């Protein structure tokens, strides 16, 4: 229990999630003993090999961030600018990782539920604004997952000479996403790890699909190196919008809610701190950087060189066909995009379940939890109708405002001795982490400001 200071009533925070501690405590105890053994190994590669088997929450971050937004922004970046914007995605995800390491530190030290912490430690209004923003984002961003997912399935089946009604594809996506999502709420450690493993396989399929297209199209190694390390910045509004879109698609405000709760669902605590850093650095960063970079390179090698304009992933798959062949151009590329849509759709459902469970204080299993996850699937309408133009604009505006606010809130908590006790930032290490967090806040704030100005037509 945290040492209490300044009269703060921190013992009233709700701590942990019962899905592991209450129902599978023996498995959790066994993992902690295994971690102690892994941490004592003399060589880092021996420790990493052990961590790899236990990682999980980082994969979920990759799953939610690799969606329709990442696919679209990466395609446009490669088609319009070639290799020049390869640096954006790695920088964007690293900014997120800095903040997520701080969020993870707070979570593992206190094991307090973040929504409860925002409500009691900061302000109820902040907690509500945060939760409602995340709920709105996870519902609205479900629309493009269904829209793109059904379009991709329709295209793949047309390649095979089959024309099926669009509702069949939408229903299939709904059934698959729901089945995977509800496995998370079964209330055992095996269910949680099985859920993470399924999404990991989807991510691996996605990365391999895009890699095959890159192998088929080839790589200009010199241009690739410059793309990653010269940090080219477009001067025109379209280019700046693409960069901001790539940064915005890398880390969203809903992930600031998802990440700590997925760690609680695994029962992680202080013993998992090294594992947490490894998990973020590998499971979150590597799949995201590989998948988005492969898409940029494939589109740079084909669409950019040929001067082909595309409006989205399906158009890109069609454009690739005469250049790299039917199988690689449409089917393989489309399988990668479809994996993006499914993983993101599943995670958006999970996030809605987390948010509503916290707001209304019901457990993460049973009818109430399942119904709360289904709120996200209002987005199935995206398979049949275009979203009203004002809806994504409104959602993006709120999210862009909330993102730096959420980062600032976690920065305050990271430096709150009454909350973290002896684990608060201090000394040289604390100064370095505070500096990195402040840089992340500034970058996100500038990006949010420019994006809002662009949406208002000022830029």
Image (spheres, rainbow, N blue to C red):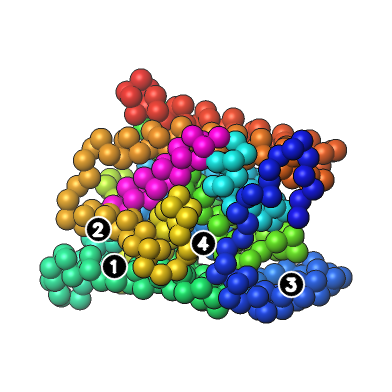
How far is the residue under mark 4 from the one under mark 2?
21 Å
Start and end of the magenta stretch?
Answer: 123-144
Q: Which mark is residue 380?
A: 2
Badge 1 marks a residue whose secondary structure is helix
Residue in the image at 72% along x and 34% along y:
435
Q: Which mark is residue 60?
A: 4
Tell me if 237 is positioned left or right of 22 in this view. Answer: left
Instruction: Point out the tag, 1 or 4, that comes first from the N-terminus.
Output: 4
**Residue 190 magenta-drawn?**
no
Residue 84 shows in the view? no
Q: Which mark is residue 173?
A: 1
Instruction: Point out the tag, 2 or 1, that comes first from the N-terminus.
Output: 1
Q: Nearer the viewer, residue 78 or 3?
A: 3
Instruction: Point out the tag, 4 or 3, that comes first from the N-terminus.
Output: 3
How far is the residue under mark 3 from the one under mark 2?
41 Å
Tell me if 75 is positioned left or right of 117 in this view. Answer: left
Residue in the image at 77% along x and 35% along y:
6
Q: Are marks 2 and 1 in contact (CB under 8 Å)?
A: yes
């Amino acid at each position: 229990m945290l040492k209490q200071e300044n009269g703060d009533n921190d013992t009233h925070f709700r701590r942990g999630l019962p899905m592991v501690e209450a129902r599978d405590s023996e498995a959790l105890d066994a993992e902690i003993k295994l971690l102690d053994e892994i941490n004592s190994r003399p060589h880092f590669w021996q420790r990493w090999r052990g961590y790899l088997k236990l990682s999980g929450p980082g994969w979920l971050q990759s799953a939610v961030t690799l969606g329709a937004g990442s696919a679209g922004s990466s395609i446009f970046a490669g088609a319009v600018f070639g290799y020049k914007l390869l640096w954006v995605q790695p920088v964007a995800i690293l900014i997120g990782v800095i903040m997520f390491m701080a969020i993870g530190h707070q979570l593992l030290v206190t094991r307090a539920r973040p929504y409860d912490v925002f409500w009691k430690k900061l302000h109820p209004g902040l907690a509500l604004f945060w939760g409602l923003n995340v709920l709105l984002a996870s519902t609205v961003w479900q629309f493009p997952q269904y829209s793109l997912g059904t379009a991709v399935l329709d295209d793949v089946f047309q390649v095979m000479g089959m024309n099926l009604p669009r509702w069949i594809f939408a229903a299939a996506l709904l059934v698959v996403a729901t089945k995977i999502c509800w496995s998370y709420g079964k209330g055992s450690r095996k269910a949680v790890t099985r859920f993470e493993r399924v999404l990991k396989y989807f991510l691996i399929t996605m990365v391999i699909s895009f890699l095959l297209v890159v192998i088929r199209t080839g790589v200009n190694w010199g241009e690739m190196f410059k793309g990653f390390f010269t940090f080219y910045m477009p001067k025109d509004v379209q280019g700046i919008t693409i960069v901001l879109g790539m940064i915005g698609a890398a880390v969203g405000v809903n992930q600031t809610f998802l990440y700590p709760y997925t760690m609680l669902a695994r029962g992680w605590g202080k013993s998992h701190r090294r594992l947490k850093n490894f998990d973020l650095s590998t499971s979150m960063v590597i799949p995201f950087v590989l998948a988005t970079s492969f898409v940029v390179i494939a589109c740079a090698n084909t669409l950019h060189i040929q001067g082909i304009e595309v409006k989205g992933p399906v158009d890109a798959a069609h454009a690739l066909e005469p250049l790299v062949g039917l199988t690689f151009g449409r089917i393989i590329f489309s399988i990668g995009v479809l994996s993006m849509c499914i993983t993101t759709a599943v995670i958006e459902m999970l996030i809605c379940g987390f948010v509503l469970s916290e707001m209304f204080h019901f457990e993460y299993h049973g009818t109430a939890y399942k119904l709360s996850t289904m709120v996200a699937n209002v987005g199935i309408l995206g398979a049949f109708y275009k979203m009203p133009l004002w809806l994504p604009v409104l959602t993006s505006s709120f999210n862009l405002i909330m993102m730096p606010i959420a980062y600032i809130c976690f920065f305050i908590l990271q430096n709150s001795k009454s909350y973290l006790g002896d684990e608060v930032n201090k000394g040289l290490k604390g100064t370095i982490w505070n500096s990195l967090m402040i840089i992340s806040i500034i970058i996100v704030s500038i990006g949010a400001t420019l994006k809002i100005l662009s949406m208002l037509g000022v830029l």
